[in-house]
Image (cartoon, rainbow, N blue to C red):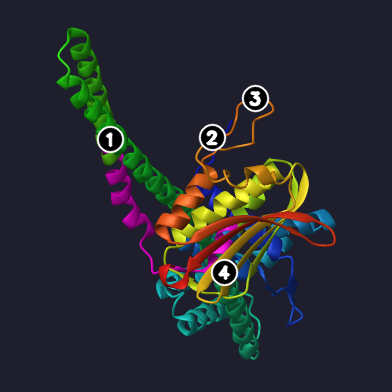
């Protein structure tokens, strides 16, 4: 099998597209001389394929066009002499493209995109002069040379217009990709930050456990018996193990905190932007879970949130709980508003809800009513613990759980109240 290298593929692409576009043409002088869009196609591809030699490519394109035109006309009229009639009629196309390539190469065509007026002027001159050379070869009148340059100008204008449109489209794609990556980075960072908070809380628990173990060691040590000495040694051993766990937590927390300032250094985020970042990730999750859930985001006041990652983590956990509470189909409403001197965030859903008896313990660590029907495993129950810890310790706010009804649905409502001075 014959392998074609990259440059050969690019040159063949130019030849084929240029030939195809050459079939859209006008004969302004009622002769074999023609104006077509092939020049626009050639100019575009020779601009994009910068590793190709302009002169070599233009010559081969002219030869390809000659062969194609001769072949097509011979099929239409087999009695025509190929050499005597067809080649002599169409060979000036090689002259045109060769001179066009020479003029483009001399003018530095590929380096002039940012200087648009110069780009159009030099492309127009290259096109017009090449057409004049072709007219001279065909021994036709040059009285209409203004038409030649006008057409060259039109083709040059179309060329730069297409280049700018493509460039603008590429910028839009890059912007969309950048925004998508930014949203993903914000979500990852908010999750990391919430984990750091939870690690710090666990470190406090570890510190308390270590102190109790050491105190137990001291109390047992006072007693003088072999059995109690053995118990005191075990208590001391437990205290040392807990201390090692604490040091590991400290190293992990320090490592994460050293990373996070670089990842997340910013001057805050508007509440509306926070909603726009959260929204796409849950749309994908809902589709993967094969549920029919509509999430509405309402933002009455578009205020700046300084601790945006923590708030994202809070809203993420609450929405996740709502999605899990809805069996197949339902509604989730996320709302942000200012009430007095507080930012109030509410997340409500018309899922299965929480029993009133559980209202007082729903925020306790480990509480859960969810389990995987496939494996039978219970959920870890730390989502609302995360939320409570962040609301109370980071924002010095409050969280409450209530019920709400309208004429259609009954809602479970989580309400977060954060003093404006702490956001």
Where residue 294 appears, as percent x and y from the top left, is: 73, 55
Which disc number belongs to residue 272?
4
Considering depth in this image, is 100 or 349 the residue closer to the camera? Answer: 349
- Residue matched to label 1: 246
Whether residue 43 is visible to the viewer of this picture, yes or no, is no
Figure quadrant of the C terminus? bottom left
Mark 4 lies on a secondary structure that is helix
- Residue matched to label 2: 380
- Real-space CA distance between mark 2 and mark 1, rounded to the nearest whole angstrom: 22 Å
- Real-space CA distance between mark 1 and mark 4, rounded to the nearest whole angstrom: 39 Å
Which disc number belongs to residue 376?
3
Total labels drawn: 4
Mark 1 lies on a secondary structure that is helix
Where residue 387 appears, as percent x and y from the top left, is: 50, 51
Identify whether 24 is placed above or below 252: below
The magenta region covers 251-278
- Real-space CA distance between mark 3 and mark 2, rounded to the nearest whole angstrom: 13 Å
Which disc number belongs to residue 282?
none
- Real-space CA distance between mark 1 and mark 3, rounded to the nearest whole angstrom: 32 Å
């Amino acid at each position: 099998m014959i392998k074609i290298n990259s440059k050969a593929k690019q040159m063949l692409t130019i030849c084929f597209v240029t030939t195809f576009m050459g079939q859209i043409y006008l004969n302004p002088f009622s002769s074999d001389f023609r104006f077509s869009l092939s020049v626009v196609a050639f100019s575009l591809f020779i601009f994009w394929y910068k590793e190709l030699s302009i002169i070599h490519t233009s010559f081969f394109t002219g030869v390809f066009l000659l062969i194609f035109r001769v072949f097509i006309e011979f099929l239409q009229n087999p009695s025509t002499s190929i050499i005597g009639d067809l080649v002599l009629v169409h060979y000036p196309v090689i002259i045109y493209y060769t001179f066009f390539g020479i003029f483009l190469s001399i003018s530095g065509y590929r380096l002039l995109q940012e200087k648009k007026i110069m780009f159009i002027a030099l492309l127009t001159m290259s096109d017009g002069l090449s057409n004049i050379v072709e007219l001279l070869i065909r021994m036709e009148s040059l009285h209409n040379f203004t038409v030649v340059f006008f057409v060259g100008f039109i083709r040059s204008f179309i060329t730069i217009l297409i280049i700018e449109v493509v460039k603008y489209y590429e910028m839009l794609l890059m912007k969309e990709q950048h925004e998508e990556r930014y949203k993903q980075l914000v979500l990852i960072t908010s999750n990391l930050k919430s984990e750091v908070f939870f690690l710090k809380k666990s470190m406090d628990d570890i510190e308390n456990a270590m102190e109790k173990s050491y105190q137990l060691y001291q109390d047992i040590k006072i007693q003088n018996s072999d059995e109690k000495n053995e118990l005191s040694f075990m208590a001391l051993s437990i205290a040392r193990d807990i201390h090692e766990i604490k040091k590991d937590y400290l190293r992990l927390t320090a490592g994460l905190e050293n990373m996070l300032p670089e990842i997340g250094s910013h001057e805050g985020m508007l509440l509306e932007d926070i909603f726009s970042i959260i929204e796409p990730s849950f749309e994908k999750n809902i589709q993967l879970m094969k549920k029919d859930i509509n999430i509405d985001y309402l933002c009455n006041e578009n205020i700046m949130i300084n601790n945006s990652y923590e708030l994202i983590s809070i809203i993420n956990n609450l929405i996740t709980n709502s999605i899990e509470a809805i069996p197949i189909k339902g509604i989730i409403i996320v709302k942000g508003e200012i009430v007095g001197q507080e930012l109030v965030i509410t997340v409500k859903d018309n899922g299965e809800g929480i029993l009133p008896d559980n209202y007082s313990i729903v925020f306790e660590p480990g509480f859960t009513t969810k389990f995987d029907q496939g494996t039978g495993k219970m959920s870890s129950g730390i989502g609302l613990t995360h939320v409570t810890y962040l609301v109370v310790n980071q924002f010095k706010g409050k969280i409450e759980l209530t019920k709400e009804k309208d004429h259609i649905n009954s809602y479970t409502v989580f309400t977060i109240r954060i003093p404006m001075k702490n956001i």
